[in-house]
């Protein structure tokens, strides 16, 4: 993102952008506000913005960074229900604490270059990093640029950094235990075709619940789908039809998106939820209450993740947070109408 890009988005000259950022006269306050709004929304904050902060009394800044790819965190990740709700809570916490929040998306294929550009242009007071699809090396790079770092939505247990994540293993274990309590023994598993820490941990927890009950997950009942599609998926439909009646009586899906997609696919395959197959999801997004039947799912404390992450960054900014920590937030099962007792 460059000054010329900001000018184009605001439909003004580069000179006008420069005046807005430097706090100098020569443009209307309406134009200045318009430019600064775009600057905030895009995360563009050049060195000139330091003076604008002084002129307009802007709060200290925290930066939310997401690495976009074609697998899990798409370019429009902020429109996906889980991330949308999480981001809203983060914004509210920053506002309540008197901090400004800038959003920055960096492409996966030029991660290192993009991160360096972000922090060299104007160093933030702290970074809240969406670690969903990131490697240890990538997280270490961000920490080298900004030590006041909190990583959410993943956890690397052996890395000396702050991590906050839901207890994935516990949540999936709760889901598996619930299906077993309902009498299900032919239980299927719907997994993402893009792998990450959260999904791998959920699979471990779910398989643990089945193993403790002496129940196996046969290969024919292991299904792989896209995690970012809520429409029906042809490959899953074909797999189900090929089973010729030997279907599982229940399915656990690694996230609600996959669960909703699975429900639509089951419907197209002539199977009813929960009469023929029960379905459980994970995340408890808003859409889980809108689909028919309403989805039984694992609730993730998205508000608490936001509260803890922002509080830790603020403490780091103020120099009162010296110890790094890893926090797993426990989950709870939300029982609705997508499962039945056998």
Image (cartoon, rainbow, N blue to C red):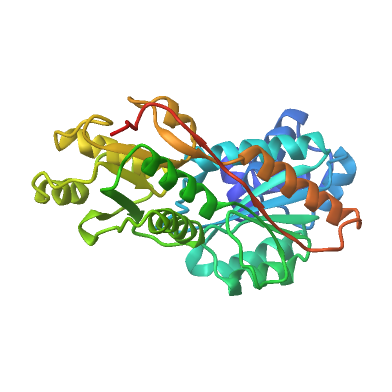
Do we see residue 255 in this rendering? yes
Q: Residue at x 61, y 40 (%)?
A: 301
Using the image as rendered, state which of residue 154 and residue 90 is in the foreground. 154
Q: Is residue 313 above or below residue 333?
A: below
Residue 11 appears in the rendering: no
Q: Quadrant of residue 268?
A: top left
Specify the quadrant that holds the N terminus.
bottom right
The quadrant of the rendering that contains the C terminus is: top left
Spot occupied by residue 231 in the image (x, y as percentages of width and height): 28, 38
* Position of residue 111 measured from the top left corner of the image (x, y, whole percent): 56, 67
Q: Looking at the image, is 281 positioned above or below residue 161?
A: above
- Give the residue at x 76% y 40%: 94
Rendered position, 156 above or below 77 = below
Name the image quarter holding residue 193. bottom left
Q: Position of residue 254 (x, y in %)?
A: 41, 49
297 and 91: which is toward the camera = 297
Q: Is residue 162 left or right of residue 188?
A: right
Along the viewing direction, whichever of 317 and 3 lies nearer the viewer = 317
């Amino acid at each position: 993102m460059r000054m010329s890009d900001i000018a184009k988005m605001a439909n003004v000259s580069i000179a006008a952008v420069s005046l807005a950022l430097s706090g100098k006269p020569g443009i209307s306050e309406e134009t200045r506000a318009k430019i600064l709004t775009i600057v905030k929304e895009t995360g563009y904050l050049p060195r000139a913005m330091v003076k604008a902060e002084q002129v307009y009394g802007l709060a200290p800044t925290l930066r939310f960074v997401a690495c976009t790819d074609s697998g899990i965190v798409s370019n429009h990740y902020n429109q996906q229900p889980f991330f949308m709700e999480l981001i809203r809570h983060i914004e509210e916490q920053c506002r309540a604490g008197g901090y400004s929040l800038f959003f920055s998306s960096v492409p996966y294929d030029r991660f290192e270059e993009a991160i360096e550009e972000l922090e060299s242009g104007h160093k933030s007071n702290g970074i809240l990093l969406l670690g969903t699809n990131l490697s240890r090396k990538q997280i270490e790079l961000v920490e080298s640029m900004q030590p006041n770092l909190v990583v959410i939505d993943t956890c690397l247990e052996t890395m000396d950094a702050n991590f906050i994540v839901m207890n994935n293993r516990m949540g999936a274990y709760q889901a598996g235990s619930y299906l077993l309590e309902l009498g299900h023994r032919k239980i299927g598993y719907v997994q993402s075709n893009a792998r990450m820490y959260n999904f791998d941990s959920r699979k471990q927890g779910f398989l643990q619940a089945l193993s403790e009950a002496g129940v196996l997950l046969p290969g024919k009942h292991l299904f792989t789908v896209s995690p970012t599609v809520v429409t029906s998926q042809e490959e899953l439909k074909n797999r189900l039809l090929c089973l010729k009646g030997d279907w599982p009586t229940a399915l656990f899906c690694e996230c609600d998106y996959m669960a909703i997609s699975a429900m639509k696919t089951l419907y197209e395959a002539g199977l009813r939820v929960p009469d023929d197959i029960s379905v459980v999801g994970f995340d408890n997004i808003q859409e889980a209450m809108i689909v028919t039947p309403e989805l039984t799912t694992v609730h993730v404390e998205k508000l608490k993740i936001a509260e803890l992450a922002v509080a830790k960054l603020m403490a780091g900014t103020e120099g009162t947070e010296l110890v790094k920590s890893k926090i797993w937030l426990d989950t709870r099962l939300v029982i609705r109408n997508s499962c039945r007792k056998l």
